[in-house]
Amino acid sequence: MNNYGFHFAESYQGYWNIAQIGRKIPGTLYIEKHSIRLELFWNNITSSDIRAISSVTGYAFTEHENKKSCYYFVLKELQLMSVSWFGKHQSQFKLDVDYLCMSDIPRFTRNGIVNCCIRTQLMDKWVWDYTQNSYSELWPFKENDIIEVKYQPKPSLTLFESALFKLYLKFGYEAHTPNADGFSMSTHTFLNLRLKKKQKFYDALDLTEAVIRFFSLLWNNKFSPDFIEFRTSKAKFIYKRSDRYSYKYRDVNNNSLSTDISNFNEGELSTIIEKWFHLLDKEIVSIETFFETQYNEHITPSTMLKNYMSVIDGFSRKLKVPATGQSKNSKKLEKYETLLNAVRPYIRANEFNELKMAILRESPSELKPRFAQLIKILSEYTNISLPPDFSDRTVETRNLLTHTKASGKDVFQKEQYRDVAFCVDDLIRAYILFEIGVPKEIAKKILPSKISMPN
């Protein structure tokens, strides 16, 4: 399967096979912005329950510029959306599709993955400084002579290699035969993962997701790849999942990049990628929560805030924080001060003060001091200008959202939730960049000039 110029069509017409119903059912597969659906037409079948279908196979084509491209499909985890009857016992079924795999090889297997290819146009832009000298021009000595332009593609560039896989860039090109419009050539850059041991499909998919998240962080761009191609020893197939089931909703196309490959010294990027995978091993739950929240632009600000504070809780759980002063937990203060006042007449003044400090002293294990300590550490890495009580108020707000019976004192107002969540988002990104060793001068390109609350 040649993936160089591949892009998903809006629809594919063909015949589809459903084990519990029949074979060669005519229908059309539609790929829309946030969903994938299959519409089928066949003689009315009332005895089959097709509210949920685990798998559908098919052979379908798309037509572009009077050329047909045919593919074999595997559609997974379908749900019935609607059904209608018309004419003489004819029916139309609309099915929502979780994900699809497509190939030019029939009956392809999805396991035994040896290579993963991630294609995004953003990568062409990111490596431009590196690839621009692949072109050379030979100017004529005489007027009106033809200018000769040569292109020598760069050899594959290894970004990182471990005992499990090799992450590298492949620089491809395609030349078009001269016609009335002249000669043309295009270049694409492909991000590849060569696996040193065959992987199951879902394990390989997790690995590609880790790579996508890394570059979304480095580029400051919540991008989705144009496509992902998986390769086995016998076949290649392209994978696509519906946003409805990946919960990735991006309504604005952003083609900007905060960094490019020339920002990194030789070997520096490899070290950063290695630290990224080490961080994933230690903090996989927190990192998944962060990116799942960040990529879902339809999520409510209150849920964003709760999720992001859960990430802060995970990242800061091992921070060493000295105990500093009395607790600022108003609910705790009210409870214990009532008890202290009850015993005050029966003990000496110095004993009362010692007891008060022992009971009300803030524990280093609590989230408030840990969050404050995290902000303090990051203040030496990037420009942070937040109110002194930001960490306390954010934790109190999270507590109010999580525990409905919590007191509402010292919390942010509802209309501030989004701004607070964006601040915590910036702090989390700064923490990850700091942990994986991205230099300060590069982090300045990625992070806002100042992490702060709006005036």
Image (cartoon, rainbow, N blue to C red):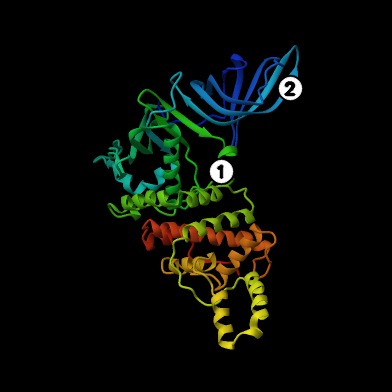
The part of the image, by quadrant, that contains residue 173 is top left
Point out residue 351 in the picture as x, y percentages from the top left corner.
56, 84
Point out residue 177 in the picture as x, y percentages from the top left corner.
37, 26
Identify the residue shown where x is 44% and y is 32%: 201
Name the kind of residue labelled 2 in the image: Ser
Point out residue 324 in the picture as x, y percentages from the top left corner.
50, 76
Nearer the observer, 393 or 158: 393
Is residue 4 visible to the viewer in this orientation of the structure?
Answer: no
Image quadrant occupied by the N terminus:
top left
**C-alpha distance separating marks 1 and 2:** 30 Å
Residue 140 higher or lower than 259, as above or below: above
Q: Residues within 10 Å of mark 1 (few under 14, many from 20)?
A: many
Name the kind of residue labelled 1 in the image: Lys
Image quadrant occupied by the C terminus:
bottom right
Point out residue 362 in the picture as x, y percentages from the top left corner.
54, 72
Q: Is residue 194 left or right of residue 421?
A: left
Element type at marker 2? strand
Element type at marker 1? loop
Residue positioned most to the bottom: 349
Nearer the observer, 311 or 420: 311
Nearer the observer, 66 or 324: 324
Identify the residue shown where x is 71% and y is 24%: 83
Residue 388 higher or lower than 88, as above or below: below
Label drawn at residue 84: 2
Q: Residues within 10 Å of mark 2 (few under 14, many from 20)?
A: few
Q: Which residue is mark 1?
A: 248
Identify the residue shown where x is 65% and y is 23%: 50
Residue 118 higher or lower than 364, as above or below: above
Q: Is residue 135 left or right of residue 367?
A: left
The part of the image, by quadrant, that contains residue 421 is bottom right
